[in-house]
Amino acid sequence: MGQYERHVFVCTSGETCPEQGDTEKFVKILRERARQVGQPGDVRVNKAGCFSQCGRGPMIVFYPEDVWYAGVQESDLDEIFTSHIVGGRPVERLRYDPEKPGANKVSEAELAEIKKAAAARATEPDGPAVAWKRVAPTADVPANGMKEFSVEGVNVLIVHTGEAFVAFQATCPHEAIPLEQGVHDGATLTCFEHMWQFDLKTGAPMGDALEGLRGYRLKEDRGELYIAL
């Protein structure tokens, strides 16, 4: 069986999967769910490169079962986790079966349309579309410290750097360890589990870290913190 009972690969860097859904977020959601139910040591959720099935994403692949999912949306993740990861039953309605091995990309014209739609979304005005969600009073975050909060089901880490507040994903991308259990010096955040480090300004990986942190826009208004998810 290897080191894990189940290995889950989410396409996060293919030609179209990241443009058809927030696949980076998919990884974080699945890792966090595994942590919440006490399975981080049994299930390994990894980011993956292109599966050469471009246009049929977002795609997720499960091993050792060799189950491929296509067209996965964020709203499908809870069912995938509960049915497949916990219950061992693949979600048949999302199962991918092109009936032929190898690359199965959609046509160049369809790929162009997918990229065009993604580009249009990326250039939409960042005005009324931004929905600010209240996190907590600024006083709830220790001076020069950090604290994890849940905002509409998303766990986020708020850090007081000594000069400002910043927000990142709540768990380390390595093994879904709560970053709140680590430490920071105002510039670098360190996870004690495997000593992965991250730049507090950008979330970029430092030292031995192989992945960075997802950051969130944060603002302070009259003693309250608000985040854009």
Image (cartoon, rainbow, N blue to C red):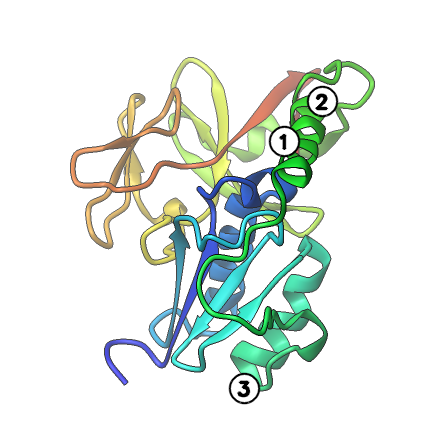
| Amino acid marked by disc 2 | Ala
- Tell me the residue at 72%/74% (across/down): 93
Name which residue lies at 67% across and 69% down.
Answer: 94
Say what amino acid the circle numbered 1 marks: Lys
**Comparing labels 1 and 2, the label whose residue is closer to the camera:** 1
Mark 1–mark 2 distance (CA, rounded to whole Å): 9 Å
Judge from the rendering whether residue 216 lies leftward or rightward of residue 201; answer left or right: right
Q: Label 2's element?
A: helix
- Mark 3 → mark 1, Cα distance in angstroms: 35 Å
- Please tell me which residue lies in front, 215 or 186: 215
Q: Residue at x 35, y 36 (%)?
A: 212
Q: Which mark is residue 88?
A: 3
Q: Quadrant of the N terminus?
A: bottom left
**What's the residue at 68%, 40% (across, down)?**
110
Q: Which residue matches tag 1?
A: 115
Which quadrant of the structure image shows residue 206?
A: top left
Q: Secondary structure at mark 3?
A: loop
**Residue at label 2?**
120
Q: Residues within 10 Å of mark 3 (few under 14, many from 20)?
A: few
Give percent across and percent down for residue 92.
Answer: 68, 79
Check if mark 1's residue and mark 2's residue have beta carbons within 8 Å. no
Residue furthest left as drawn = 207
With 101 as the anchor, is 184 left or right in this view?
left
Placement of 150 over or under 167, stated as above or below: below
Compared to 225, does 41 lie above or below? below
Q: Against 17, is 4 above or below? A: below
In the image, residue 88 lies at what x, y percent? 54, 86
